[in-house]
Amino acid sequence: MTEGVIFMEKINIIMGPPGTGKTENLLRIVDRELKEGTAPNRIAFVSFTNKATDEARDRAKTKFNLTDSDFPFFCTLHAFGKRQLGFTKSEVMDKQDYREFADNYGVELKTVSLDWDGNGVFTTDNKYLRDINKSRMQRLELQDYYNKANLDYPWNELIWAYRSLEEYKHQSSKCDFTDMLSQYVEFGPSPPLDVVIVDEAQDLTKLQWDMCDKMWKNAKRVYISGDDDQAIFRWAGADIEHLINMKGNQSVLKQSHRCPKKVHVIAQDIVNRIVHRREKTWNPRDEEGEVNFHAYPGSVDISEGNWLLLATCKYMLKDFEEELRYRGLPYTKFGKPPVSTDLLRGVEAWGRLNDFEDISYNDVGAVYSNLKSGVGVARGHKNLQTLEEGKSYNAEELVMNHGLLSSGDPWDIAFNIGDQDKSYIMSMEKHGGLRADAKINLSTIHMAKGGECDNVALMTDLSRANRDEMEINSDDTNRAFYVGVTRAKKSLHIVQAEYGGFII
């Protein structure tokens, strides 16, 4: 056997290019196994996120009249490790634990992201914690990782952070997400499984692959689904080489139900730049689609239809966001609106109050929640305890009987909100009114993976870190933009880099 190549006859590798129905194919495998008599508790369906596992479980439950308890192994790898080792949620470090650790040891920590139902990627602004976790996910000794990664800070700083974290976990009797995986590999049992299905395999780290190896040790059939061309989590430790080198019965899902012809041309041009990959071809939809090039974000007409606005990193979405705020267009950023729907409702209801109109009980709630207690609304009245549900109220009645202290000021004076939100809401009023029906979402390419939209606008600027990385490993940058362009179902709008970046 060739060195570095993994081979098992029972392994079936399913390559799923963009929009080819990878999830549906895995759901059909689950259906077939259950129809052929495989017990649901002898099927494992593990994925990067809970989305696919939940969908598979829910479909099987409905079709075969089963319950959640019949599918103990439909979960993320973290949840699998937790269950097999018997951890409780209170034994695993959460965000508050990390903040307490940072305070106790004088570690600078602003952000940390981890979620039982999330994508299994540990993210933080602290470089030491980030590198410690990455070394463990790659199953490298910390010193070896440090030497290999060519980090820009002294070794003694990293080893101090590592020892401090281990000391905190020991003293608090806690483990972290990565501990659950590594302890399962070392000590966990191999469950009696007949079938193991692994989704989003291109995103697995060396530690997660080792976990899968142990999981399917006794299995009869293994289905590994992914696409190395969409492997964009190498920065978090993903081991792309494992999937690229794996041997088994390979099949390729060839028909995309998402990408039109013109988008497919762009996608193929990008993917052909990837040097190290598994060769595969796929076909676009019959529709021609549309591809347009723009010099700057403001030239993209995003006033109609559904839009996904993408960039390689969060701060590079700033130009898009500024344009949206200037135009007063409703949008979400990473799935969340920039101002709450409650605030928009309150502003609209406040205007009606000042026009001597009655507003509903719920509208009063939206108004009161945005007034400063003791200034805009009397203390003790924010909970609407003196109001009745189902009734309407005018400004005079609210002032006289229900704690409203002022109703004559404009909303931008009366409401307790920041200048940026005030400016954005005023722009919304100027350009079409207060709308919460956002059809535009801003996202990084990484956070949009697996999603799709009719219209996609893609920033091709690169951060300094991205440009440096491209010089070292251009494959990663090509994969990221390949994922970005293939989110488009109808039209793709490419905003070319003004000061240098990725060229499409």
Image (cartoon, grey):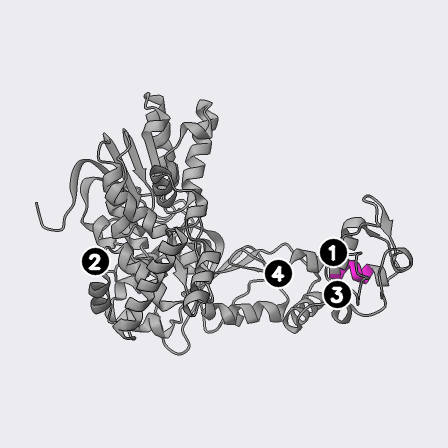
Tell me the SS state at disc 1.
Answer: helix
Give yes or no for contact between labels 3 and 4 (Cβ–Cβ under 8 Å).
Answer: no
Q: Looking at this view, is 475 or 173 the one in front?
A: 173
Above-or-below relation of 461 to 221:
below
Which residue is rendered at x = 24% and y = 44% of the image? 186
- Tell me the amino acid under the disc marked 3: Lys
Q: Quadrant of residue 128?
A: bottom left
Is 105 magenta? The answer is no
- Tell me the amino acid under the disc marked 2: His
The residue under label 4 is 330
Is 351 magenta? The answer is yes
Magenta stretch bounds: 347-352
- Please indicate whether residue 435 sits to the left or right of residue 488 in the image: right
Q: Quadrant of residue 336?
A: bottom right
Q: Quadrant of residue 149?
A: bottom left
**Label placed on residue 276:** 2
Tell me the SS state at disc 4.
Answer: loop
Above-or-below relation of 247 to 304:
above
The residue under label 1 is 366
Q: Looking at this view, is 495 or 471 the one in front?
A: 471
